[in-house]
Image (cartoon, rainbow, N blue to C red):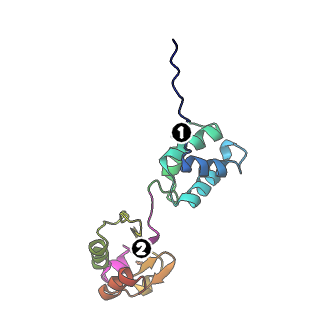
Amino acid sequence: MTVTQATQPVMIVQDPVKVRVGEILARFKGDSSELIPVLQKVQEAFGYLPEESMKQIARFLGIRESSVFGVATFYAQFKLVPTGRNIIKVCRGTGCHVRGAPQLLGELEKRLGVKAGETTPDLEYSLETVACFGSCALAPVVVVNDQVYGRMTLPKVRKLVEDGGA
Ligand code: FES
C-alpha cells in the first residue's frame, strides 16, 4: 500500500530588499561603469546600502562583491548602516571648538544617548561631527539636516532635540 502525503502549498516570500533593489537595477544596463549611480539609487531608496544588496549589485554588474564594498566604503557619500531621519552635525573646527562646540556635542550625546558617529535605536537621529562648515563667523555651528544653526548655546541644543527647532 502506498501512502501519499498531502503536500502543503509552498509560499515563497520575497525579500523586500531584494525586490526593491531588483526594481532599481532594472533601470540600468548592467555595465560595470554604472556602479556609482547604482549605489546612489540604492542608497536613495533605503537611506543606506543594505549589506544584502551588495551581492545582487555585484552579480548584476558582473563584478566582484569585494569591488562593490570597496567603492561603497571609499566614498564618504555612501553609508553602510542605517542613518537617522534627522542628521545632526556639530562642527569640530577650531573656531567652533573655542566657542564651546565640545560642550554642545557632549550635551547632544547625553540627550540622545549615542556618541558622535552613531544613530539612535529608533532611527530618529544620527549624530555626526564635521571639520568645518565654513561659517566660522557663526561659531559654534550645528546643522540639522540642511538647516544651519549659528551661535549655538546649551539651551538651544536642548531645545533642538526636544522639539526639533532652535
Ligand atoms: S570652525 Fe566651525 S564653521 Fe568653521
Closest to the observer, 111 or 99: 111
Label 2 near ligand 1 (CB < 8 Å):
no
What residue is shown at x 43% (from left), y 73% (from top)? Answer: 132
Q: Quadrant of the C terminus?
A: bottom left
80 on left or right of 110: right
- Rendered-image quarter of ligand 1: bottom left
Between the residue at mark 1 and the residue at mark 2, the CA separation in whole angstroms equals 32 Å
130 to 46, vertically: above or below: below
What residue is shown at x 30% (from left), y 85% (from top)? Answer: 154
Residue 96 magenta-highlighted? yes
10 Å crowding of disc 2: few (<14), some (14-19), many (20+) = many
Quarter assignment of residue 83: bottom left
131 to 23, vertically: above or below: below
Q: Are marks 1 and 2 in contact (CB under 8 Å)?
A: no
Find residue 80 and name its label: none
Q: Amino acid at mark 2?
A: Ile
97 on left or right of 133: left
Q: Amino acid at mark 1?
A: Glu
Closest to the observer, 103 or 30: 30
List x then y, in percent, for residue 164.
Answer: 42, 82
List x then y, in percent, for residue 29.
Answer: 73, 45
| Start-end of magenta stretch | 82-101
Quarter assignment of residue 84: bottom left
Tag 2, which secondary structure? strand
Residue identified by numbered label 1:
65
Find residue 88 and name its label: 2
